C-alpha cells in the first residue's frame, strides 16, 4: 500500500524520545512537510526504523541523533545518524549477521540479542531496498536506507 513514510518515522521518534531524553540525547528530524509517499508495508517500515533508532539511542552516550528523509534520483532515502560509539571497519561487514555483536562484553551491558540488524536487512530486502553503513569509531554512525520511488506491485 502507499504510505506516508514521514508519518511512520514521526511515530517511531515519539516512541524512543523519552529514552533518548533520559540519556541526554537530542533527536532531530528533517522531512519534507508535504510528506513522502512510499509503496511499503507500514508495520514493517515501523520495525526497521524502530530497530535503527533503538540502536542509535543504545549506542550513544549524550549527543545527537538526526533522522532525515528525502528524495534523490528516483529513490527515497532515509538516514539515521548518531554521535555515538561508532563501529570499527572490521566489524561493519558482519553487522547484518544474526547474533553478531561488537565487543561481546561491553555490548552485554547494553542488553540486546544481536538480532536487530539481521531483521532490518531482511525487511529492507523484501522492499527492494538497500542499506548502507558509514561509521567511525568514537565519532558516530550513519545508516542509509534507499527504496525505489513510484513502485506499485
Ligand atoms: P537487538 O537489536 O537484537 O536488541 P543489538 O542491538 O545488539 O541487539 P543489532 O541491532 O543487530 O543487535 O546490532 C548489532 C551490533 O552492531 C550491536 O551489538 C552493536 O555492537 C552494533 N551497532 C548497531 N548499531 C549501532 C550504532 N548505531 N552505533 C554503534 N554500534 C552499533
Ligand atoms: Mg539493535
Image: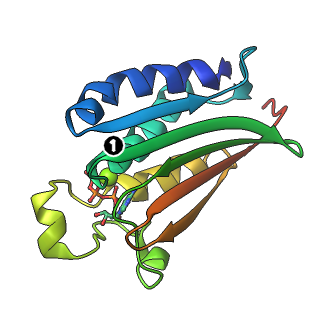
Q: In this view, does 60 lie to the left or right of 140?
A: left
Residue at 52% x, 27% y: name it. Answer: 9
Q: Is residue 58 left or right of residue 79?
A: left
Answer with the quarter of the image where residue 22 lies: top left
- Residue depicted at 19% across the width and 65% down the height: 107
Q: Give the residue at x 78% y 32%.
A: 153
The residue sitting at 41% across, 52% down in the picture is: 119
Q: Position of residue 102 (x, y in %)?
A: 29, 73
The answer to whether residue 28 is seen in the rendering is yes
83 w.r.t. 37: above or below: below
Q: Mark 1 points at which residue?
A: 54
Where is residue 3 drawn, in percent x and y?
66, 19
Q: Nearer the viewer, residue 125 or 57?
A: 57
Q: Where is residue 2 in the image (x, y as percent from the top left)?
A: 71, 20
Which corner quadrant holds the N terminus?
top right
The reply to whether residue 125 is in sight is no
Farthest residue to the right: give it: 73
Amino acid at each position: 500500500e502507499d504510505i506516508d513514510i514521514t508519518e511512520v518515522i514521526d511515530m517511531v521518534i515519539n516512541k524512543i524520545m523519552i529514552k533518548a531524553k533520559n540519556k541526554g540525547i537530542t533527536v532531530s528530524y528533517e522531512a519534507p512537510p508535504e510528506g513522502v509517499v512510499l509503496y511499503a508495508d507500514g508495520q514493517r517500515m515501523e520495525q526497521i526504523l524502530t530497530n535503527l533508532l533503538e540502536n542509535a539511542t543504545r549506542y550513544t552516550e549524550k549527543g545527537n541523533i538526526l533522522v532525515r528523509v528525502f528524495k534523490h534520483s528516483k529513490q527515497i532515502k532515509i538516514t539515521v545518524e548518531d554521535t555515538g560509539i561508532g563501529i570499527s571497519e572490521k566489524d561493519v561487514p558482519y553487522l547484518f549477521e544474526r547474533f553478531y555483536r561488537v565487543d561481546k562484553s561491553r555490548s552485554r551491558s547494553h542488553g540486546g540479542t544481536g538480532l536487530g540488524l539481521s531483521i532490518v536487512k531482511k525487511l529492507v530486502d523484501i522492499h527492494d531496498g538497500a542499506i548502507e553503513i558509514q561509521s567511525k569509531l568514537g565519532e558516530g554512525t550513519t545508516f542509509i536506507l534507499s527504496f525505489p520511488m513510484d513502485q506499485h506491485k
